[in-house]
Image (cartoon, rainbow, N blue to C red):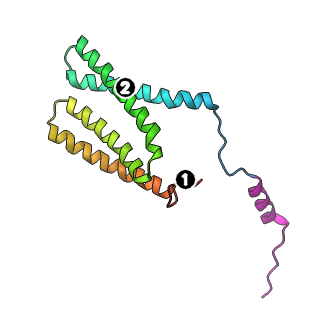
Amino acid sequence: MAHTAPTTGGMMGRVRANRAARPTLTPDLFDERVHTAGRYGIPVVLGLVYGFWAAANRRGGGEITGWNILFGFVTAACFIVLCIAVATFAPLLKRELHSLVKSAFAGAAVAFLYDQSGQTALRSVALGVVVTAGIFLVFFYRYYTREDASGNRIR
């Protein structure tokens, strides 16, 4: 049975030519100012929400007091500082420690919120460990599949 020989023209030739012309990386739509605002704006917004949530858990549906508001703002400030520190310094670590630092921060944050609702410390720690383990698995898988053996990101 006879088959036709492949040629450079025709439908397949045009598809290959179009693939070569496409850029391989997605374009960066925002300039450096937007990235800087996001780098610090996102932790600030998350910190304010976290502080409000912690204060609401602590008051347990009771009246809002000055101490409750102060607790919310102090909690928000601590969360913001820790979130920026983790986001800045965790990428400098190896993938195992990078995953562990980010997941430990998330687990501790969840455990603290749960503790403010009046639960026992043992239940709060157990929930924090479960959250840390789950997030560690997700982050480790993500970094493991996107880095080579020496820790360089594959692009």
> Which residue is found at the position 46% from the left and 53% from the top?
142
Which residue is identified by label 2? 49
Using a 10 Å C-alpha cutoff, classify the residue at mark 1 as few (fewer than 14 neighbours), some (14 to 19) or many (20 or more).
few
Q: Earlier in the sequence, mark 1 or mark 2?
A: 2
* Amino acid type indicated by mark 1: Arg
Let me know if residue 64 appears in the view.
no
Dividing the picture into quadrants, the one containing residue 51 is top left
Residue 139 lies in the magenta-colored region: no
> Which residue is found at the position 76% from the left and 62% from the top?
16
Q: Where is residue 28 shown, x and y percent of the image?
A: 65, 39
Q: Secondary structure at mark 1?
A: loop
Cα separation between marks 1 and 2: 32 Å
* Amino acid type indicated by mark 2: Val
Q: Residue 154 vs residue 46: left or right?
A: right
Which residue is identified by label 1? 153
Dividing the picture into quadrants, the one containing residue 104 is top left
Above or below, comparing residue 53 to residue 147 in the picture:
above
Between residue 1 and residue 19, name the one nearer to us.
Answer: 19
Quarter of the image with the N terminus is bottom right
Q: Residue 130 vs residue 28: left or right?
A: left
Q: Give the magenta range.
A: 1-21
Q: Where is residue 151 shown, x and y percent of the image?
A: 50, 55
> Which residue is found at the position 39% from the left and 50% from the top?
97
